[in-house]
Image (cartoon, coloured by chain):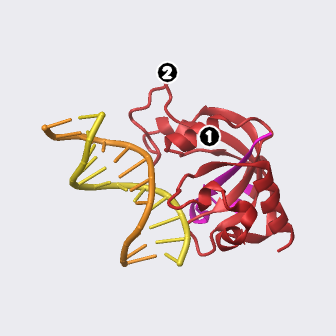
Chain colours: A red, B yellow, C orange
Amino acid sequence: MNYWLLKSEPGVFGIDDLAESRDRRTTWDGVRNYQARNFMREMTQGDEAFFYHSNCARPGIVGRMRVVREAHPDPTQFDPRDEHYDPRSRRDAPRWSAVDLEFAGRFAETVTLARLREEPALADMLILRRGNRLSVTPLTASQWRAVLALAEHS
DNA sequence: GCCAACGTTGGC
DNA sequence: GCCAACGTTGGC
């Protein structure tokens, strides 16, 4: 079992959009960073992930998801009308991957970025490191539990 | 392989 | 809107 944190801008695709998706599932596509892509390729079915709202008034963790389909070629890379189209990617050698995720609950309160920074148990969390902008990062089991504890005691 | 220029991310 | 930090691009 692995734990992950995935960022998305709520103005583009927020946790409510996931909760309202068909079967409460979505394909997490559009990732165009190699490090983030490589983390997605490490995901296995049943892995747990947090949904983080970025680039918004109250950035922070807003809920949970579960990996329901492992890495597969991101279809948007082949679609010339999609903003994530990559003309250099070939169908016989796809450059970018996506995973499918299922909604697993929304927190009663957002665990804000400011709150995450205050928590000693989360000092090593990757997204809290200076300048880290990765949209997909791994968490340790203890970091996962620490965030859940913050969510439950807010 | 170096590195300057540029584009993007994302908090504030 | 600002800007620090980072990744990517492309000339050389």
Tell me which segment is drawn in magenta.
Answer: A1-18
Residue A87's disc is none
Chain of the residue under label 1: A
Look at the image and tell me whether residue A66 can be seen.
Answer: yes
Look at the image and tell me whether residue A17 can be seen.
Answer: no
Q: What amino acid type is highlighted by mark number 2?
A: Asp
Whether residue A70 is situated above or below residue A26 in the rendered picture: above
Is disc 2 on the same chain as disc 1? Answer: yes
Indicate the quadrant where residue A44 lies.
top right
Residue located beneath label 2 in the image: A92
Chain of the residue under label 2: A
**Alpha-carbon neighbours of circle 2 within 10 Å: few (<14), some, or many (≥20)?**
few
Q: Is residue A3 left or right of residue A74?
A: right
Whether residue A28 is situated above or below residue A120 in the rendered picture: above
Residue located beneath label 1 in the image: A39
Q: What amino acid type is highlighted by mark number 1?
A: Phe
Image quarter where the N terminus of chain A lies is top right
